Amino acid sequence: MVALSALWLPILLSAVFVFIASSIIHMALSFWHKGDFIQVPSESKAMDALRPLAIPPGDYMMPKAGGMAEMKTPEFAEKLKKGPVIVMTVLPSGPFSMGAQLGQWFLFSVVMSFFAAYVTSHAVPAGGNYLHVFRFAGTTAFLGYAAGQWPFSIWYRRSWITTIKGTIDGLLYACLTAGTLGWLWPK
């Protein structure tokens, strides 16, 4: 077993590599995620209609049943039939600043690298083969970066294309994490 204290450099460095790669994907290769969100038809009218409601930031569903019994009522069935049926996230109004999100993303990447290192440290001894380190670290990181996206397409009907692109991103991040841990694995 490898002590986690011996893995802090590869953990942090792999998070830096993932952060850089994700920045390239979202800024230099902006076409890749450009279609993840589509514009609401008559956007101005929709925003004007919602603005007076002062909906606080959060996750919402419309129509929203109070429980299983209500979901079975004719009134709720009519609401669904009439539409629109919406799952939405409301963000705070005002200028869009990404500083907090970027900091949280980097912290998430550190956490993913930590868990990949943790699992691998129990499976591969010091001096272990690069490909063994890559396999364990890569699988663990892939699950963390990619697998959690799939339920959003399954349950909330998020576009499968968006989920698949996020999964491909997750595969790249997992390979960067695994490659860094394999490269700097204690001898």
Image (tube, rainbow, N blue to C red):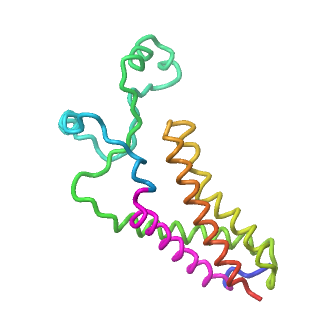
| Image x and y of residue 167, in percent | 58, 54
The quadrant in which residue 90 appears is top left
Majority secondary structure of magenta residues: helix
The quadrant in which residue 183 appears is bottom right
Q: Measured along the vertical axis of the image, is residue 31 above or below residue 122?
A: above
The stretch drawn in magenta includes residue 37: no
Left or right: 26 as drawn, with respect to 152:
left
Q: Measured along the vertical axis of the image, is residue 71 above or below residue 64?
A: above
Provide the residue span drawn in magenta: 6-31
User: Closest to the observer: 172 or 113?
Assistant: 172
**Numbered label tally:** 0
Left or right: 36 as drawn, with respect to 112:
left
Residue beneath the point at 66% across and 75% down: 179
Residue beneath the point at 22% across and 36% down: 53
Left or right: 165 as drawn, with respect to 91:
right
The stretch drawn in magenta includes residue 21: yes
